[in-house]
Image (spheres, grey):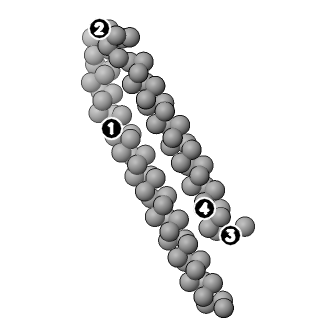
């Protein structure tokens, strides 16, 4: 198995985990609404959650972009190596 195939497998796994995290974020959002959780503790949580969930989503997006960048770099390195070997 090549480094590119290993990388592609890892990226698929990481994307699956990122998707699972996004679904979990959506679930927390649904279940922490003011119709479900009332009162000052719920209000504080929602205020904090709004900021935190945006930060988590931004980190997930950054991770996905980095995975693609690494994959492209590895593909380029493998293509250059192949040219050298030919």
Q: CA distance from mark 1 to mark 3?
A: 36 Å
* Circle 3 SS class: loop
Distance between the Cα atoms at labels 1 and 4? 28 Å
Q: Residues within 10 Å of mark 2 (few under 14, many from 20)?
A: few
Q: Are marks 2 and 1 in contact (CB under 8 Å)?
A: no
Q: Which residue is mark 2?
A: 39
Labels 1 and 4 touching (C-beta < 8 A): no
From the top left corner, tell me how far across and down residue 85 is, in percent: 66, 89
Q: Quadrant of the N terminus?
A: bottom right
- Above or below for 11 versus 50: below
| Residue 55 as seen in the image, left or right of residue 71 | left
Q: Earlier in the sequence, mark 1 or mark 3?
A: 3
SS at mark 4 in the image: helix
Q: Residue at x 53, y 37 (%)?
A: 20
How dense is the environment of label 4, judged by Cα within 10 Å: few (below 14), some, or many (20 and up)?
A: some
Res 41 visible: no
**Occupied quadrant, residue 80:** bottom right
Q: Residues under labels 2 and 4: Cα distance?
A: 47 Å
Q: Which residue is mark 1?
A: 54
Tag 4 or tag 2, which sits nearer the N-term?
4
First in sequence: mark 4 or mark 3? 3
Q: Position of residue 24 (x, y in %)?
A: 48, 30
Q: Which residue is mark 3?
A: 2
Q: Is residue 48 left or right of 14 when viewed as pictured?
A: left
Which is more N-terminal, label 4 or label 1? 4
Q: Quadrant of residue 47?
A: top left
Residue labelled with disc 4: 7
Sequence-first disc among 2 and 1: 2
- Per the model, the C-alpha gap separating discs 3 and 2 is 55 Å
């Amino acid at each position: 198995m090549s480094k590119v195939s290993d990388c592609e497998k890892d990226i698929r796994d990481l994307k699956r985990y990122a998707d699972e995290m996004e679904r979990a974020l959506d679930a927390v959002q649904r279940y922490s609404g003011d119709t479900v959780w009332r009162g000052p503790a719920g209000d504080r949580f929602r205020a904090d959650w709004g900021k935190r969930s945006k930060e988590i989503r931004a980190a997930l997006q950054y991770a996905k972009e980095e995975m693609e960048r690494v994959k492209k770099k590895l593909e380029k390195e493998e293509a250059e190596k192949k040219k050298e070997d030919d």
